[in-house]
Amino acid sequence: MAAAAVDSAMEVVPALAEEAAPEVAGLSCLVNLPGEHPRAGCGRHRFQLSVKLRGCFSPRRWPSLMKHYSPTDYVNWLEEYKVRQKAGLEARKIVASFSKRFFSEHVPCNGFSDIENLEGPEIFFEDELVCILNMEGRKALTWKYYAKKILYYLRQQKILNNLKAFLQQPDDYESYLEGAVYIDQYCNPLSDISLKDIQAQIDSIVELVCKTLRGINSRHPSLAFKAGESSMIMEIELQSQVLDAMNYVLYDQLKFKGNRMDYYNALNLYMHQVLIRRTGIPISMSLLYLTIARQLGVPLEPVNFPSHFLLRWCQGAEGATLDIFDYIYIDAFGKGKQLTVKECEYLIGQHVTAALYGVVNVKKVLQRMVGNLLSLGKREGIDQSYQLLRDSLDLYLAMYPDQVQLLLLQARLYFHLGIWPEKSFCLVLKVLDILQHIQTLDPGQHGAVGYLVQHTLEHIERKKEEVGVEVKLRSDEKHRDVCYSIGLIMKHKRYGYNCVIYGWDPTCMMGHEWIRNMNVHSLPHGHHQPFYNVLVEDGSCRYAAQENLEYNVEPQEISHPDVGRYFSEFTGTHYIPNAELEIRYPEDLEFVYETVQNIYSAKKENIDE
């Protein structure tokens, strides 16, 4: 009877037999041993079973789960194991289906509907995706590619919902750091970023400030504050001592500084990166400075100053009528320098009205942070996925859903990237829905909306006309001039970049305008030669003429975000196409093997000689 019960359990949790064989014996306490009273065995084995099954949730097996469990809580570990196994199988099933469903296009806006309807704890599903991403070696690239996309989506949806709830807080809710962390998390959903961890890092800085402050004034009231208190100090002299200690610790001891050398870098806006790199731009440095000051009792306030975010420090008497000259303005980007009104204007080189010296609420601060990210996203030249632009648009429209120009930009972006719903007639779910909303908000945008609607409907018609997959055979007479194959690592003769081929055409298939703009006619063979789609190491995708490419004698992995979309493995000399790409180029892989053997074997023989 006991053996039968154990066998039944093993059918549900087969992984125990592979990696946790010693733990299997512990399953016997789930049933009564022969001749025992129904409760006789439990006391003797319960602790042993708990420890052994809990070990199945170890970081080596499932790396991110244990933080969700308290060591003091009773947990039925076998049941947890079963649920985790089931979630893992479901996750792998969905990941495996994505390449076949979405190889020819970006994952559409309703492509994640299967995930949204999953049963069971989401943490288990996410954990399986993390396990896939952490698989060692250069294999399972396609699995990793889609696991990353799914995990990205799941976490972003959760973060966006949290942000929207946060924005519903009253205007006097002043958790600037919490809002900034939501932005950080949304733009970096695969990183382990939490308000708790960031607050802990800031608390360690506060401890250093207190140590310095103790040397200035051993009886300073801030030294008596307990963690989480929100007391404020009213005496200006005592506030000044705190700021002096902060400036010393932040800028002299810890070497924080404004990032003047690499100002237009999105990392400057992510709070976890500001703490790691100890640099940022005015708004992120100000939020760090503000958070520390308030924890130590100094009531600084954020000022949405044009071109340079500032903080203000009140010097007037409590209850008095104040104007902009009753404040000192602090430049956290400039090592905590304290400025007068005139010096603020000198800082940006222009005179501004008094209204621009006023304090702003959390939502306005976040709007400026996201606005900065949006500007950086528009500047993107290399990242053809426009991920930063897409993320910042999502964040901005979560705060201000009726911004017509941004809705138009979002519609154009979806159209440009080809991010369509799974069935073409459902386009209204995204692009047309956005356009209809714009038309309602601002009828004056009729021309732009009409243009996008026309092109969206044309896309629907093209999708209806599409037939099956185009298969390209190297043995076909019209492909006789094609010299290279998908998966080969190449080098551009003129520009020197490394790349991998993921597609080819017997002649240039681009339009006349592209051919003219790229000056293709100046090439010796012009556009009447094979052209190759290549993924470049800088993250771009290019269309290169055959005469401009050559074999890379020192092949290396191409760090392009879309490698996994087309290839399943990197062998050290070339990439192996995944099933979907191989269907389109069924004869290329054999040619690749011959090419690799000829090129790299010959090179090895020369070295040996």
Image (cartoon, rainbow, N blue to C red):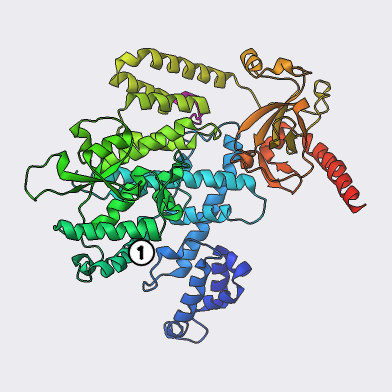
229 in relation to 142, above or below: below
Task: Please identify the quarter of the rendering in which residue 164 is found.
Answer: top left
Residue 352 lies left or right of residue 538; in this view the side is left
490 in relation to 504, above or below: below
Q: Which residue occupies the foreground of this view, 120 or 159?
A: 159
Residue for badge 1: 204
Q: Residue at x 85, y 40 (%)?
A: 594
Residue 25 is covered by the magenta coloring: no
Residue 365 lies left or right of residue 158; in this view the side is left
Q: Residue at x 48, y 24 (%)?
A: 415
Which region of the structure is painted magenta? Answer: 418-428
Mark 1 element type: helix
Residue 542 lies left or right of residue 106; in this view the side is right
Q: Which residue occupies the foreground of this view, 393 or 98?
A: 393
Q: Which residue occupies the foreground of this view, 579 or 565?
A: 565
| Farthest left residue in view | 320
Task: Please identify the quarter of the rendering in which residue 116 is found.
Answer: top left
x, y percentage for residue 94?
54, 46
Q: Which residue occupies the foreground of this view, 94 or 181?
A: 181
